[in-house]
Amino acid sequence: MMLIAELTQKAMRLGVPFAVHVDLTWRCNERCEHCYLEHDDQGEMGTEELLNLFDQLADAGVFFLTLSGGEPMIRRDFWDLVGRARALQFNVKLKTNAVLIRQAEAERLRSLGVEQIQISVYSHRPEVHDAITKLPGSLERTLRGVRALRAAGIKVAMANVMMRSNLADRKAVAALARELGATYSADPTVTPMITGDRSVLDLRIPGSELAGLFHDNELVGDVESFCAPPPPVGDAELDGLPCSAGHSACYVSPYGDVYPCVQFPLPSGNVRRQRFLDIWRQSPQLLEVRSIRMRDLPVCSTCAHMGICTRCPGLAWTEGSMRGPSSADCEKSFYRTGVPSANMLARGLVTFPSGIAETALAAFAPGAHAGLGLIQIAPLPQTAA
Amino acid sequence: MSATYIARSTAVAARRLGDEMVVMSALDSTLFSLSDVAAVLWESADGRTPLDQIVRDRVCSSYDVDHPTALRDAEEFVRALAAHGILFVSEQPIEAPGAQAAAASGSPR
């Protein structure tokens, strides 16, 4: 096991919040069409409140601290906050659009010991990237920031959210990342607005395009292995945790709200009213999240994909139940392997040619390996069932 | 025999996790897991206290080990961390480890 995985397991055993994501603000200088945040400031935490929060997080044992937003660098106290975070010896990762980063800012981030900076780049073409961010000139400024950071010796991870409007550009963005010395990751996940509004999900790439993505060696590495039928499910998988959200990781909003994860907006307490550690240890919501094992998921525990599924409990929660399936991940599992999920079968989203239904269903039971290649699938609805 | 002083680099992330110390270099993202005894040395690396004194006062007083053995192991340990740039070792007190870390970035002893 990798050291980082061992440490995360140990943090879970000890009840330590090893990784915390703090959004310093939801305000932003861009207006990305897929963004899940409300950008108007509704009373975000001030400098002293955030500094106090950082002190509490260090005392609680947090090691990985992700600072994000909104655009975190538009805060006037940004440098004070990063300086304190580093003085407290967090491993600081920054998520930014890099629009405000020039040589001086890059060198300052380097001198502070910020370990990695994640920057969203949607396309290599300004007309596509800028149309998504709704900020003219943003691609040029973002790439200027990437170059400055690389020149300063800082690791840069270029993250590409793949949507209908930029899907065609993904290979060119990957090439651009290589050219700039940045790592590249692509993700087709578009999440509902934190307010619950699901209209942004229309931007998701159609399911039928996912198969192409998952069978692209450049994107997934070894396609044969990545797209292999799911392995049999045993007790180890059934006793496993859905994900680290609420177990060794959590999220704090600019207003002090604590959630299990930024993608799991279940209000679990507020650091303006309670100590962080009290919320972490005693919040009924976090305790409920921690109580769930894979075998407790009524649909997913019967699914052939259980051992390899990327199921997001936060997305499941936004669909109606933290114990339910995450339809977008069901779709990904299906297009990855050709094997429909238990959720898809239960909801009648998969139809079989006449006469083979029983055979097909048996083949897709947990532990089965066969994919018949005879399936027709209807698109999954993007709203809760 | 000259004294040895040790100081933590500021270009690291570090946190106690139970009985071990987790340290990650911001320079190359190398991750270290230090045992309980190693964590004592790490936490005592203030640049002012001689290694010999740290070993005598904080290691030998708490663990069942003789001083020469503990000191030999400690010297080996701090030089290994220094090779990774996360600890600085000097025969003189290190007054401003942060400044030294910045100046010596990439070329630790």
Image (cartoon, coloured by chain):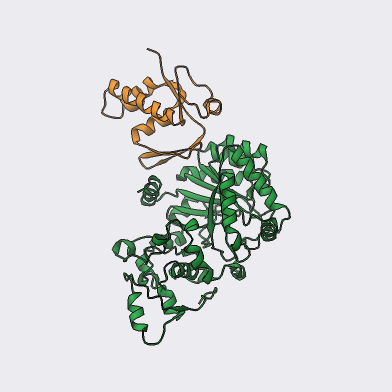
Chain colours: A green, B orange
Position of B83 relative to A326 (above/below): above
- Asked where in the image residue A224 lies, by quadrant, the reply is bottom left
Residue at horizontal 44%, vertical 70%? A334
The location of residue A356, given as percent across then percent down, is: 36, 84
- On screen, residue A60 above or below A172: above
Does A385 sit left or right of A6 as displayed? Answer: right
Question: Who's the residue at 66% across and 38% down the image?
Answer: A103
Q: Residue furthest bottom?
A: A354
Residue B70 placement, left or right of A127: left
The number of numbered discs placed on residues in the rendered structure image is 0
Nearer to us in this view, B16 or A205: A205
- Residue A216 image offset from top left, x and y in percent: 49, 61
x, y (%) of residue A305?
A: 38, 67
| Residue A275 visible (yes or no) | no
The residue positioned farthest toward the right in the image shown:
A136
Q: In which quarter of the image is residue A129?
A: bottom right
Is the N terminus of chain B in the top left, top right, bottom left or bottom right quadrant?
top left
**Considering the image in quadrants, where does the C terminus of chain B appear?**
top left
Q: Which of the two residues, B101 or A281, is positioned nearer the viewer here? A: B101
Tell me if A253 is positioned left or right of B42 in this view: right
Q: Quadrant of residue B31?
A: top left
Give the vertical position of B35 relative to A140 (above or below): above
Answer above or below: position of A242 versus B6: below
Q: Residue A376: x, y in percent? A: 46, 79
Residue at horizontal 51 percent and vertical 29 percent from the top = B106
Q: Does the image show residue A63?
A: yes
Residue furthest top as drawn: B1
